Amino acid sequence: MIEYDSRKFWRLVFQLRGSVIPRIALRMLLVTLVAAGVTLVHFYWRPIKFSSTPFSIVGVALGLLLVFRTNASYDRFWEGRKLWGRVVNAARNYALGVSNYIHSSGESSALKGKSIDGTVAFCHLMMQHLRSEYDAGSVDHLVDKDLLQQLNEADHKPVRMMSELTKWLEQARVEKQISDVQAAELNKELTELIGCLGGCERILKTPLPLAYVLHLKRFMVLFCLVLPAGLVFDLGWWTIPSIFFITYSFFGIEEIGIEIEDPFGRDPNDLPLDGLCDTIEKNLKELRQV
């Protein structure tokens, strides 16, 4: 995600980085060329006159569809952000509990350290899983060689890491390093982490219905291609710039929805998962020293 200052009005007006313009420019150009062709036909071959009323009615329907599209995408974006906020809180709570409950001496210290490091590793693995990536270098300093090898071979790496965290928590309970009540409290935080993973997977693997997406795209393209015929009699040569700005509005809104409907990727407007994982690692490293 790109950080910006919303108070810098003119800088944002002309900023291309993070904008959808590069991705819709060709579509805008093609429709504008069609509008130019219709205008030339109107002036140099045969006048074109259609009532603008049907276009006004259909334009309202298209606008409503685009609003629904954008709202549905933003709901997914915001739900993803809330889930990762819960990941941050649960990771901190678990590390705080481990840091306070398990003694910092001998084997207890080692168990405490690898439990905190394992929580950080889980968050990194969760991020990579949602992006269909895997970078062993991001977790090799957090887990031992045997576990790293197991992670390399695992199909679902975050679940494999969670399995180890659960085992270490049970080991601490069996060895009386923590009480049953404390173990139950800490297990709730691990359950919260795995629940957030499931929630993110639900967003990732449940796209908008294909029928809706196809209908909207076809409706929008057809409307933009036919619209010049409805405007040229009243607007004349102004039809060309008018169509340019109308297509910028329609195609831009739809493209924004496409970009944010999967909030876990690396697009400029996706969630800053790298920064969130770095924050978790920084916070938990401080707790490891306590």
Image (cartoon, rainbow, N blue to C red):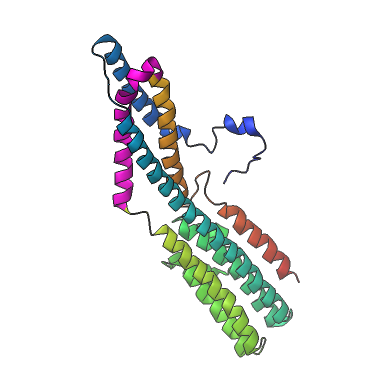
**Res. 149 visible in picture:** no
Q: Residue 64 appears at what percent x and percent y?
A: 40, 44
Residue closest to the eye, 278 or 254: 254
Q: Residue 146 appears at what percent x and percent y?
A: 52, 71
Q: Which residues are magenta?
A: 210-238
Residue 206 belongs to magenta span = no
Q: Residue 151 appears at what percent x and percent y?
A: 48, 67
Point 54% across, 81% down: residue = 167
Residue closest to the eye, 231 or 84: 231
- Report whether 262 appears left or right of 220: right
Q: Residue 153 appears at what percent x and percent y?
A: 43, 67
Quadrant of res 11: top right
Residue closest to the eye, 200 or 28: 28
Q: Farthest top residue?
A: 44
- Report whether 120 appears left or right of 157: right
**Number of marks in picture:** 0
